[in-house]
């Protein structure tokens, strides 16, 4: 990943902020865990040079890699040596040939070869392969991560202090913090998004004070490349120039059953699912807050809504499948899921 110059569309508070945009290729094993036949196997086969292999930390009391190894089902689905981030060092003719056969968000079919290559070549240092930047002080011997979704279950939860005690905190989309600090905390290490979800959040939650994405000197942005828009936005972020073309032109960077239906081309895991699966492949311990649980009907769609709004299921995400997966991972001791 590289220094960027801000993030967002036209509007206030969206430029001039040091941050490091990091593109997320795909949460490793995400496809297998969510029953997607298009698992990006091309990213397998060993660790990225210069990046320690996950799952070898013995200092944690309950490391998730041991829980995975001891579970007869999940041990066949996780590959903790799979690279998490897509960067220039992975770009080969073989990778392009493999990815160009399938549609996004998992692959590159129909996308411009020039746009993909010109973006990834800007991410040409091994630092771009690391989710965790080189620490300024001694790194924690057990990396504890909190992934904070935006579910209504967090409203009134008073989990903010517990969330902030984690070494790293992942947030996503409309990560409204002001006024909800006691429930969701204030710490942000990573902010994950697609260009579409980021822009929709800036528009929809502006009245709640969400006028810019989270910002900070040590904060890193995780681009989820669901379409060519992410590559164009990322390239502009690295170069510090406006997006040259497409629907974002001029902007600055300041296995589901649905797969086999007519909706297969629009289905993708939710942003929260991709962030949670990313953490599961990079952290020693993972806590999930604000994710869908079996009693979701008791809570509003989002924690920051002033009036009760029920969760609506759209065809582009299979939230019921995701909920079942989180319950199973929680039961297996692979992650801890906040429930009420």
Image (spheres, grey):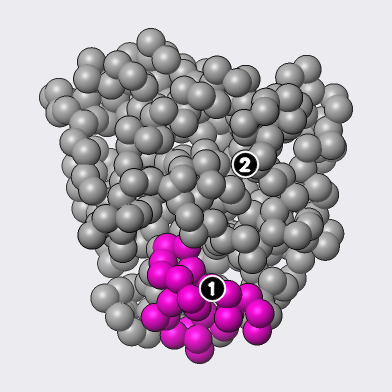
Q: Is mark 2 on a helix, strand or loop?
A: loop
On the rendered image, what quadrant is the C terminus found in? Answer: top left
Q: Quadrant of the N terminus?
A: bottom right
334 lies above or below 110: above
Task: Give the image quarter of residue 230.
Answer: bottom left
Q: Quadrant of residue 298?
A: top left
| Residue at the extreme top | 340
Q: Which residue is drawn at 56% across and 30% down?
A: 146
Task: Confirm whether the magenta stretch covers residue 244.
Answer: no
Tell me if I can see residue 322 in this picture.
yes
Q: Is residue 120 visible?
A: no
Residue receiving disc 1: 99
Residue located beneath label 2 in the image: 77
Q: What stretch of residues is rendered in magenta? A: 93-117
Outermost residue to the bottom: 114
Q: In this view, does 39 lie above or below 247?
A: above
> Residue 274: x percent and y percent?
48, 46
Residue at horizontal 50%, vertical 86%? 113
Residue 74: x and y in percent read 62, 33
Local crowd size for mark 1, using a 10 Å CA cut-off: few (<14), some (14–19), many (≥20): some
Instruction: Residue 112: give its label.
Output: none
Residue located 66% across and 39% down the image: 76
- From mark 2 to mark 1, how far is it between C-alphas? 21 Å
Find residue 133 and report its horizontal and vertical position in percent: 72, 51
Which-is-in-front pick, marks 2 and 1?
A: 2
């Amino acid at each position: 990943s590289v220094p960027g110059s801000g993030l967002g569309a036209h509007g206030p508070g969206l430029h001039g902020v040091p941050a490091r945009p990091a593109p997320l290729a795909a949460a490793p094993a995400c496809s297998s865990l969510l029953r997607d036949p298009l698992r990006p196997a091309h990213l397998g086969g060993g660790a990225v040079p210069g990046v320690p292999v996950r799952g070898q930390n013995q200092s944690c009391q309950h490391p998730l890699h041991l829980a995975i190894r001891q579970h007869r089902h999940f041990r066949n689905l996780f590959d903790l040596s799979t690279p998490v981030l897509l960067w220039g060092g992975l770009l080969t003719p073989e990778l392009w040939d493999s990815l160009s056969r399938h549609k996004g968000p998992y692959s590159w079919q129909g996308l411009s070869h020039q746009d993909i290559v010109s973006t990834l070549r800007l991410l040409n240092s091994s630092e771009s392969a690391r989710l965790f930047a080189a620490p300024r002080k001694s790194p924690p011997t057990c990396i504890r991560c909190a992934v904070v979704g935006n579910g209504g279950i967090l409203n009134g939860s008073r989990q903010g202090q517990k969330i902030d005690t984690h070494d790293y905190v992942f947030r996503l989309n409309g990560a409204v913090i002001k006024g909800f600090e006691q429930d969701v905390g204030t710490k942000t290490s990573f902010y994950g998004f697609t260009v579409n979800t980021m822009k929709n959040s800036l528009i929809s939650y502006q009245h709640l004070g969400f006028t810019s994405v989270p910002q900070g000197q040590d904060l890193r942005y995780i681009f989820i490349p669901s379409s060519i828009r992410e590559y164009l936005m990322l390239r502009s972020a690295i170069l510090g120039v406006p997006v040259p073309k497409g629907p974002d032109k001029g902007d600055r960077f300041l296995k589901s059953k649905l797969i086999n239906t007519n909706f297969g081309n629009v289905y993708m895991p939710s942003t929260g699912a991709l962030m949670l699966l990313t953490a599961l492949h990079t952290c020693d311990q993972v806590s999930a807050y604000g994710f869908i649980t079996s009693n979701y009907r008791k809570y509003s769609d989002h924690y920051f809504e002033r009036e009760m709004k029920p969760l609506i299921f759209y065809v582009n995400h299979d939230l019921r499948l995701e909920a079942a997966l989180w319950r199973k991972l929680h039961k297996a001791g692979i992650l801890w899921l906040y429930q009420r």
